[in-house]
Amino acid sequence: MERRELGFVVLNQGYVSVNGRELEHEASGSALLTELYRNHIADWPKFFKMDTLSKAGFVASELLIKELGEHRLGSEEFAQGRAIVLFGATASLCADRNYQETIQDKDNYYPSPALFVYTLPNIVTGEIAIRNHWRGETSFYVTEAPDAAQMAFHLACAFQDQVTDIILAGWVDSSRNDDFQAFMTVVRREDAADTGWIEGQLKRMINILNNK
Amino acid sequence: MVRLIRCIADNVVSPLGLDSRSNYDSVRAGKSGLARYESMGNISTPFVLSRVDRVAIDALCGKLGIKGNYTFFEKFLLCSSVQAVREAGIDASSERVLFIVSTTKGNTSLLGQPQDGVSDERVLLAKAAREVSRFFGNPGSPLVVCNACISGVCAQIEAMRALRSGLYDYAVVIGADEQSPFIISGFLSFKAISDEPCRPFDKDRRGLNLGECAATVVLEASDEIKGGWELVCGAIRNDANHISGPSRTGEGSYLALMEVLKECRRDELAFVNVHGTATAYNDEMESIALYRAGLIDVPVTGLKGYYGHTMGAAGIMESILSMYAVRDNTVLATRGYREQGVTYPVSVSSEIRECRGSEFIKLLSGFGGSNAALLYRFVE
């Protein structure tokens, strides 16, 4: 069966592309995320409260959803059918390090709830769900490295929930504030049964990320 | 036909016991692991915690033949999973066995206190999980489920799906978290921790207690009915409302409950084991979700008064104790509860109650707006 290619976004601290088309930018590191937010999103001030992992995941999801059009993938009525399944290796390690600094020294002890809340990697799935009013499944899986076969398998598994019809899926990683990697795509129920094909698409995104 | 998923072995390691049976007996007898601490590390605010004795864990590891340079968290995972895998009698070194670890913070305490002979890399959750699967000689890549407080239910749901796909015959699902100053200081900064034993659903509830537990279920896929505990279905839903507070309408929990109720035989539903953290917002939210789902008359029970909030272990340990309770025709008492303190009067009690039925629902919710429910059924 002929399949249309999945739309996808690839992003790291010095590179961003949508469907393989590189976007022009001036900044790098976390400043790149702010530049992308100002130039392409601009209407979600919650962005500025987020940690790097959430910013990277949020920006990737916004660039992808805007590119796909389709009224941001559906109205309120389909909210339960929209799932977000993300993978990563470092999970919330970047936020963990930032928070640890606030409790490490007895003389400089000031634990911050605003930092602590981001010490969970699934917060990025919540940020995206809130933005889009999606009430479907949100899951964050931690694996050793991006593995297209493993990701395709667990995405296919997610469609065993019969309510789920579209999954925003991808990889999000950040070990330092200025160091992040992400790719994101959308998998539809009608495509999901062909895990070999999904795996190939994911492999392509992983290759782009590894070469940038 | 859809493959049937059975729980063939289980284990709970906690301050209340080193196996599931002793944990259940302790809870039934009203014992609690909660104790007051005046300080810990740089924390100088008092709090109540259920903490596992490190010496007891080392002794258990020795007894079970768990040797090697492991962190406390890894030992905790191992001493529960080794017992469960032995009880299951499976060959865990087979590629047809999937390892899933449910945790929120894993080895994060290494950030504050590195350990000799343990690589810094082990703060990565999948590296810690690999230590466990490697112990069993399993060749596959372990999966870590990191969905905040609902991880233990999500891990069982993902195991069920992976088994139904046909790629695996068994899944070893292990949940644990270490209560280090990292987590405790964070929840204290949220003003979410009570300095007295928690009071789920009570009008005077003042917040949660944290707790330590490691719990394991071994799930098996089969094409025929064999009897025992079947994991029937589960669902994960998001509130899409707030990253650190539950929905005022209980939306995600309500949707997750409605999904599992599609498979539930209502006259067989013995009880709902809720999250019941004893924070003002969580318990109120759960009462709304239960009411909206038409479950206001079904007995409700929460275990945080015995264990505190055990994070990555909660969904697994609370499922296991619910299995023992259903077989004992018992709704366990909700320790700490005295007087109804939520808008919708859920059927909660400080006393042990009798019940009938062969099914229970396990419900959890957590940061990130996440909610999850699953349905277990005992088949004769």
Image: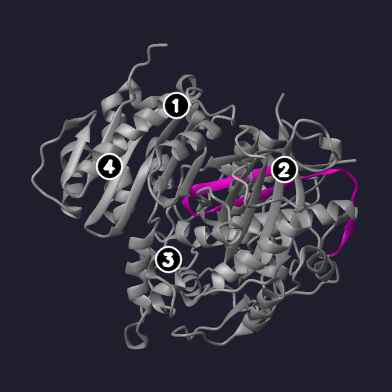
Instruction: Give the amino acid type for the residue marked by disc 3 in the picture.
Output: Val
- Does residue B360 belong to the magenta stretch? yes
Q: CA distance from mark 2 to mark 4?
A: 40 Å
x and y, in percent, of residue B26 in the image: 82, 71
User: Marks 2/3: CA distance?
Assistant: 30 Å
Bin the neighbour count of mark 1 within 10 Å (Cα to Cα): few under 14, some 14-19, many 20 and up.
Answer: some
Which element is circle 4 on? helix
Question: What's the image's color scheme?
Answer: one colour
B237 within the magenta span: no
Distance from label 1 to label 3 (Cα)?
Answer: 32 Å
Query: Do the residues bearing badges 4 and 1 touch, measured as CB atoms within 8 Å?
Result: no
* Rendered image: mark on residue A196: 1
- Quadrant containing the N terminus of chain A is top left
Rendering coords of residue A163 (x, y %): 57, 28
Q: Residue at x 43, y 85 (%)?
A: B42
Provide the residue designation for mark 2.
B220
Distance (Cα) linking label 4 and label 1: 28 Å
Please state the horizontal and vertical placement of residue B35, each as a whole percent of the image: 67, 81
- Mark 4 or mark 3, whichever is nearer to me: 3
Distance of label 4 from label 3 (alpha carbons): 26 Å
Q: Please, what is the three-letter code of the amino acid marked with disc 2? A: Glu
* Figure check: A115 above or below B294: below
Do the residues bearing badges 2 and 4 touch, measured as CB atoms within 8 Å?
Answer: no
Magenta-colored span = B351-374
Chain to which mark 1 belongs: A
Circle 4 packing at 10 Å, graded few (<14), some (14-19), many (20+), is many
Residue B203, relative to residue B261: is it above or below? below
Residue under label 4, please give it: A59
Q: Is residue A25 left or right of residue B103?
A: left
Q: In this figure, which residue is indicated by the disc labeled 3?
A: B123
If you read the primary sequence from the N terminus, does the residue marked by circle 2 or circle 3 appear first?
3
